Each structure stands twice: as structure tokens, then as C-alpha cells.
Amino acid sequence: MEQQEQKCVLVIDAALPLGLIANTAAILGTTLGSAKPNVVGRSVTDAAGGMHLGINTVPTTVLQASEERLRELRLRLYEPEYEDLLVVDFSDVAQRIQIYEDYLSEAERTRTEEFRYFGLALYGNKKKVNRLTGMLPLLRA
């Protein structure tokens, strides 16, 4: 699918403290970038010879949602209609555990409906992403 038909949206719980909002966005972006390295453009050298690594070439929006709306959205993303979207979630389970192997063990013992989602990243077909998130407001500090 052509890149202009793709969209990336981060949806973050605006009730979180600012530091946790920033941390959530960073984790979602890092994970998304590792899963879709083709969305990063080429690096560029400026007129003074300074190197600037490539950045995201796909439109990306940061939206806000309540804890409840994030949960509803995450559950919808398990529906077959949305299985072609790339979804990254960041939750309380991931945030409170410092050792990744411990996170894996805890996540395996936690039921889907028990996760408290701090944020989601969605990447894929622009129309599908808009259908899921078009009514959400921009995240504002």
C-alpha cells in the first residue's frame, strides 16, 4: 500500500502526569519505529555539514482519550476488521516492571481486560485509523 494511504496515530491518556505522557509517547514511537523501519526517511546533511538522522515520513497525530476509551479502543483493535493495523500498546503492567523478562511473565498472567492502557499507537490504512480515532481530540499540554 502506498505510504500516503497510511497514517500513524498515538492515543494517550491525558489524565497521566506529563512525564508519564512523554514516556508513553517515547515508548510507543520507539516500538513502532522498530516494527516499521521503512517509515523513517533518509538522513540528511545540512549546509554546515551536520548530520540529521531520518525522521518519520508518515503523518502522525497525537490524540487524547480517557482510560475507559483507551480500553474500548484496544479491545476493538482485536476485531478481525482491524487485524491489518499495527498496534502498539503501553500499559501499567509494562510501566511498573523494570526487568523485561518480569514484564513478560506478568503480562502472560494478566487478562486483557485487566490492563490499564496508558497509550496506544496505531499504524496502517488511513481510513481505518480515522474510523477508530477521528472523534478523539488532539493531546494538548
Image (tube, rainbow, N blue to C red):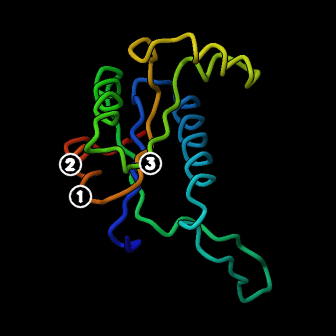
Q: Kindly indicate whether the residue at mark 1 contacts the one at mark 2 (C-beta within 8 angstroms).
A: yes
The spot of residue 22 in percent (x, y) is: 56, 38
The spot of residue 107 in percent (x, y) is: 58, 18
Q: Residue at x 44, y 48 (%)?
A: 86
At mark 2, the secondary structure is helix
Q: Amino acid at mark 2?
A: Arg
Q: Amino acid at mark 3?
A: Leu
Dot 1 or dot 3: first in sequence order is 3
Using the image, determine if residue 58 lies above or below residue 72: below
At mark 1, the secondary structure is helix
Q: Is residue 35 toward the left or the right of residue 79 in the image?
A: right
Spatial separation of the CA atoms under disc 2 and disc 1: 6 Å
The spot of residue 36 in percent (x, y) is: 56, 58
Q: Amino acid at mark 1?
A: Lys
Q: Which residue is mark 3?
A: 86
Q: Which residue is mark 1?
A: 127
Spatial separation of the CA atoms under disc 3 and disc 2: 15 Å
Q: Residue at x 42, y 57 (%)?
A: 60
Q: Which residue is mark 2?
A: 131
Q: Is residue 121 toward the left or the right of residue 19 in the image?
A: left
